Amino acid sequence: MPTVKRILKGDKVKIISGANKGTTGTVLQVLTKKQAVLIEGVGELHRHIKPSQLNPRGGHKDIHVPVSLHKVALIVDEKSGKTSRVGRLKTADDRTVRIAKQNNDKEIK
C-alpha cells in the first residue's frame, strides 16, 4: 500500500518562514530524502563556473535551491490564500486520504 505524503508535486504552497516568507508557488518536485521541495519561482540562482580543462570558457549555470518542508504550508483555499496543516485519514473503503486540519478535516483533492 503506497504511503500518502503531506505535500505532493503540483500542490500550491505558501512559504511561512525565511527570506521568502509569504511567497506562494507550485511544487515542482518533492525531495523526500532531503525533506525539501522545489517551488516554482523560488530559489532560482546563478552559479558561476570557473574555467577548467573540460570547460575552458567557464561561465554560469542556473540552479534551483530547495526549500525545507517545515517552511511551507499547503494552500487549501486559493481565493483567500488560507493555509492548513495536512493530516491523514482512512476511509471506509480502506483508502488513505489527505485532510485539511483547518477545514474541519475536509478531504484535499
Image: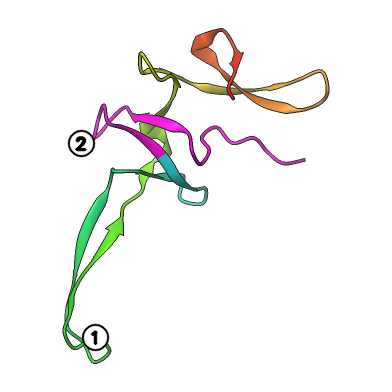
Asked if the stretch drawn in magenta spans residue 7, the answer is: yes
In the picture, measured across the screen, residue 79 lies left or right of residue 53, that is right
Q: Quadrant of residue 96?
A: top right
Residue 99 horizontal/vertical position (percent)? 59, 20
Residue marked by disc 1? 55
Name the amino acid type tagged 2.
Ala
| Colouring mode (rainbow / by chain / secondary structure / one colour) | rainbow
Q: Main secondary structure of the magenta part?
A: loop
Q: Quadrant of residue 64?
A: bottom left
Residue 27 horizontal/vertical position (percent)? 43, 40
Sequence-wise first label, 2 or 1: 2
Q: In the picture shown, does residue 53 fall above or below 19?
A: below
| Image quadrant occupied by the C terminus | top right
Residue furthest front in the image? 79
Residue 1 horizontal/vertical position (percent)? 77, 40
Q: In the picture shown, does residue 22 fall above or below 59?
A: above
Residue marked by disc 2? 19
Counting other residues with Cα less than 10 Å from the Cα at mark 1, is it few (<14), some (14-19), or many (20 or more)?
Answer: few
Asked if the stretch drawn in magenta spans residue 52, the answer is: no
Residue furthest right in the image? 93
Q: In the picture shown, does residue 58 fall above or below 15?
A: below
